[in-house]
Image (cartoon, coloured by chain):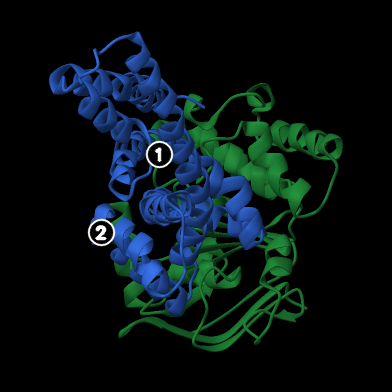
Chain colours: A green, B blue
Amino acid sequence: MALIRIENAWKSFGKVPVLQGVSLEVGEGEIVAILGRSGSGKSTLLRCINGLEKIDTGNIWVDGTLVNAAGADVRKLREKVGIVFQSYNLFPHLSVERNITLAPTVVKRMTREEARAIASDVLRRVGLEDKIGAYPDQLSGGQQQRVAIARSLAMSPKAILFDEITSALDPELTGEVLRTLAELARQGWTMVLVTHEIGFARNVAHRAVFMHDGKAWEEGPPKQVLVKPETKELRNFIASVLD
Amino acid sequence: MLRAFTFNEVLFLLDATKWTIAVTLIAFVGGGLVGLLIMILKVVNNRPAQWGAAAYVELFQGTPLLAQLFVVYFGMGLFGYDVSPWVAVSVVFTLWSAAFLGEIWRGCVQAIPRAQWEASAALGLSFAQQIRYVIAAQAARIALPPTVGFLVQIIKNTSLASVIGFIELARAGQIVNSATFRPFLVYCTVAMIYFALCYPLTALSRRLEGKLHGAH
């Protein structure tokens, strides 16, 4: 059974329709890249998966639990699904270590020692074990984003959502973050990425989903979908991105 | 017969200064507690709470402190409650500073980017945990300079308590002046004592503001 199942999800902000009947499944260990123009609903869809936004109609299941049910435990959901944001959103007043150990200690009630061991482990995974005592403003954008990834990993979620996490970075810093993602992919994490990096999607993702007009317009193996698009809309999108 | 303005008169003024300080502390601590409540009512997602807090703030920011003192001191008397100047001054200064501190702190909490709320929510923190570990710590840092700045306003405004017969520094100045009739000398001394209380705080507030950038 799919880890994440979205069934005919609709959402609008005021009168602006954003999601217009999206259906999508993500299996355990699967890496799904979501592509599309800005305004196509990609980020909103991600934010609905971990309850930062609520869909108007339709259903979203995560790990067998209906997310949008009345009285659904959104905090339990967020222990299962982590999210990494475009603007990192580290806590500026806390050290790298505390940024990472905060949620394990206060949400999962781990001891400081246990959490510290996890912090060094996840920092090693993103290649920043020497920055454990630093503060966010002492790090480059790429390093901050890798700490944000480590912070999410530390909660050992079943899936991690990535919301255009390289879009705010200079091109020379994008590479280090993409390498980190590729490493996570190798370790078998379930990942859903909203991205503009078509090359990365082609090489790392198991499946590419092109969103258009608030729908999952075209999807399939990236090497097929992104190389031989079937719809005119996806052809235009790829042409405009590669220009 | 006129008395001379001697060291004894200065001592009398300094003695009265302790009541100025006492009222300031009551206003700051009491106003801080009530102000915290006002701030919380204004940031929680609850319309009636927000309206109630907003009405409170408008009432106390929109009327002169002097009028508030008169209303509570003489007004309570009309209803048969004889309040002492002490009680009236404590109550009015607490309520008045709460309106300002609540607003200052609300601004500081709302200055924390929404992304900080989202990031902490996404990690599974509860509302109380978000406030405690993520929002309050950052808001407190930006709140420090304006809070210390407002403390200076409280000190200066305690002089209004003299109008209902409460003997603090300003009232003591009036008393010394009627006995010595050396208004310039007396009120310069009074002003200098206020300055000695306020200046260190103003300097501190300015230093904190400078330190805020980049410090952890």
Res. A51 image quadrant: bottom right
Residue shown at 49% from the left, 48% from the top: B32
Residue A103 spot, x, y in % from top left: 71, 49
Residue B16: x %, y % from top left:
41, 28
The single residue placed furthest to the left in the displayed view is B184
Please state the horizontal and vertical placement of residue A129, each as a whole percent of the image: 69, 26
Q: Describe residue B29's horizontal placement relative to residue A70 as left or right.
A: left
Q: Which mark is residue B147?
A: 1
- Relative to the observer, which residue lies in front, A92 or B53? B53
Image location of residue A44, percent across then percent down: 46, 70
Report which quarter residue B98 is drawn in.
Answer: bottom left
Q: In the figure, is residue A103 to the left or right of A115? A: left
Q: Nearer the viewer, residue B91 or B62?
A: B91
Name the foreground residue: B193 vs B95. Answer: B193
Say whether residue A94 is visible: yes
| Chain identifier of the residue bearing label 2 in the image | B
Alpha-carbon span between mark 2 and mark 1: 24 Å
Say the numbered circle drawn on residue B67: 2
The answer to which of A127 and A16 lies nearer the viewer is A16
Q: Chain of mark 1?
A: B
**Label 2 sits on what residue type?**
Ala
Which corner quadrant holds the N terminus of chain B?
A: top left
Type of amino acid at the residue the image marks with label 1: Thr
Kindly identify the residue that appears in the image at 65 percent across and 35 percent down. A126
Question: Does B187 sit above or below residue B167?
Answer: above
Element type at mark 1? helix
Q: Residues within 10 Å of mark 2 (few under 14, many from 20)?
A: few
User: Vertical placement of B183 versus A33: above or below?
Assistant: above
Near mark 1 (Cα within 10 A), the count class, few <14, some 14-19 or many ≥20, is: some
- Regarding residue B214, the answer to whether it shows in the image is no
Q: Residue shown at 65%/44% (left/top)?
A: A151
Taking the view exactly as shown, the residue that stands out farthest to the front is B1
